[in-house]
Amino acid sequence: QVELVESGGGLVQAGGSLRLSCVASGSMFSISTMGWYRQAPGKQRELVAAITSGSSTNYLDSVKSRFTISRDNAKNTVYLQMNSLKPEDTAVYYCNAAGTVAAIRYNYWGQGTQVTVSS
């Protein structure tokens, strides 16, 4: 079992920045990829950014060049630096940790942190 605890959300004006953090604890042997998803009211949850244990990254097109995901494996922590925030970035952001071991898929979620961008 893996527990994920997020922090760093809040209210910011358009053009501002926020940094989200997610600390993982527990059976990390099963985890290879960590990422951030978001869900706005009335919309489906979408992948914002993900990073593998080898530091390969991928991003949602609309956040490329504005958001940066990074990972500190020694601290079991993943970060999402969000710059040039826009009102459409407003959502609940969820940390995710996933991996596959011996054909068993592991997938864990944090409780979510609210990000609100005012215009």
Image (spheres, grey):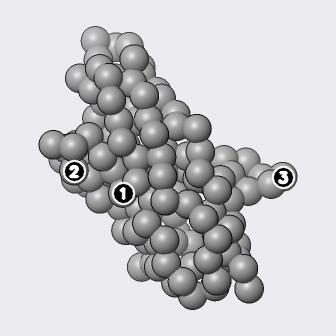
Above/below status of 57 relative to 81 = above
Q: From the top left corner, tell me how far across and down residue 111 is, in percent.
A: 58, 38
Quadrant holding the N terminus: top left
Amino acid identity at mark 1: Tyr
Q: What is the distance, in whole Å, between disc 3 and disc 1 at their CAs?
A: 26 Å
Q: Which residue is mark 3?
A: 42
Q: From the top left corner, tell me how far across and down residue 118 is, in percent.
A: 72, 79
Above/below status of 29 relative to 61 = above
Q: Secondary structure at mark 1?
A: strand
Q: Earlier in the sequence, mark 2 or mark 3?
A: 3
Q: Which residue is mark 2?
A: 72
Amino acid identity at mark 3: Gly
- Image mark for residue 79: 1
Residue at 63 percent of width and 85 percent of height? 14
Q: Residue furthest right?
A: 42
In this picture, residue 16 sits left or right of residue 59: right
Above/below status of 75 relative to 93 = above
Residue at 57 percent of width and 87 percent of height? 15
**Is any atom of residue 30 visible in this view?**
no
Q: Are marks 1 and 2 in contact (CB under 8 Å)?
A: yes
Camera-nearest label, 2 or 3: 2
Q: Earlier in the sequence, mark 3 or mark 1?
A: 3
